[in-house]
Amino acid sequence: MRVTDQLGFSVEVPDLPRRIVSLVPSITELLAHLSLEKEVLGITKFCEFPTEWQQTKVRVGGTKNPNIKAIELLNPDLIVGNKEENTQEMLLKLKTRFPVWISDIETLEQALQMIEALGALTRRSMMATELNQQIASAFRGLEPVRPAKRCLYLIWCNPYMVAGSNTFIDDMLKWCGFENAAANLEGRYPELDAEGIRALAPELVLLSSEPYPFKDSHADELRALLPNTSKCMLVDGTYFSWYGSRLAESPRYFQKVISEL
């Protein structure tokens, strides 16, 4: 059957894909939720969930630099990628040989569309619909912070990098009632030095657990840099940046973060 991915590319896939490779950790977790244990053959080294798949699936390298030969040996009839997490060059190379369905997700709505689309692709539409209903209900029940807090969300250190506008993290911050202090900076993940961070004067700083594993020592450094910031805290980045089945639990985690402010 011929389908369209989230970049608008037409993709010819089998009526029921049976040899799937996932190049996106959060989508790997989603495919497990959709009971595709037998169909998923290959995952990246960063696909940590479900944990048992780390031993039972072929690891095909990283998200940016997968082992093309390892993928070829699996002879997949569906590869699932992402515009941001994978490189354009690599995805285009794979598309010349295999069906590649590419997601492009900056909002909760687009995440729900992806889940629905992959559910239809894999004959798991009912499960995908039930999951989306769970996610939508959970987000409707989220009580955002009031009044809004000016928030800076850090994803990297040396140099500091933050989540800017037009990112999925930015949309999750909005759901929490946070105003992204980096929203007007150029680029989706701007680099900042200490003076740049101080100039933004955030009320709240969130230090993500991924891709850079921030520690308490980093929080202490930023508290010293920003004495007027009311809170600087470590957060589990998967709830802010993973757009698969984990979204069903994200609002509960967000509410916990909000309660600590």
Image (cartoon, grey):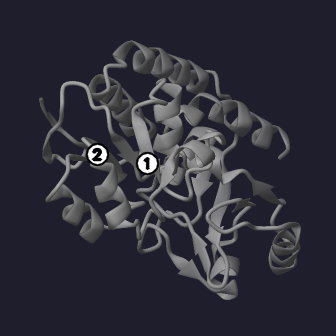
Residue picked out by circle 2: 76
**Residue at 16% from the left image edge and 46% from the top image edge:** 8
Whether residues under marks 1 and 2 lie with C-beta atoms below 8 angstroms apart, the answer is yes
Which quadrant would residue 166 be assigned to in this image?
Answer: bottom left
In the image, is residue 37 above or below residue 227? Answer: above
What is the distance, in whole Å, between disc 1 and disc 2 at their CAs? 9 Å
- The mark nearer the N terminus, 1 or 2, is 1
How many discs mark residues in the rendered view?
Answer: 2
What is the x, y in percent for residue 46?
56, 57
Is 5 positioned to the left or the right of 230 in the image? Answer: left
Q: Which mark is residue 42?
A: 1
Which quadrant would residue 210 be assigned to in this image?
Answer: bottom right
Residue 225: tell me if it is visible: yes
For the N terminus, the quadrant is top left
**Residue at 87% from the left image edge and 78% from the top image edge:** 224
Foreground residue among 190 and 37: 37
Residue 83: tell me if it is visible: no
What is the x, y in percent for residue 144?
66, 35
Is 77 positioned to the left or the right of 68 in the image? Answer: left
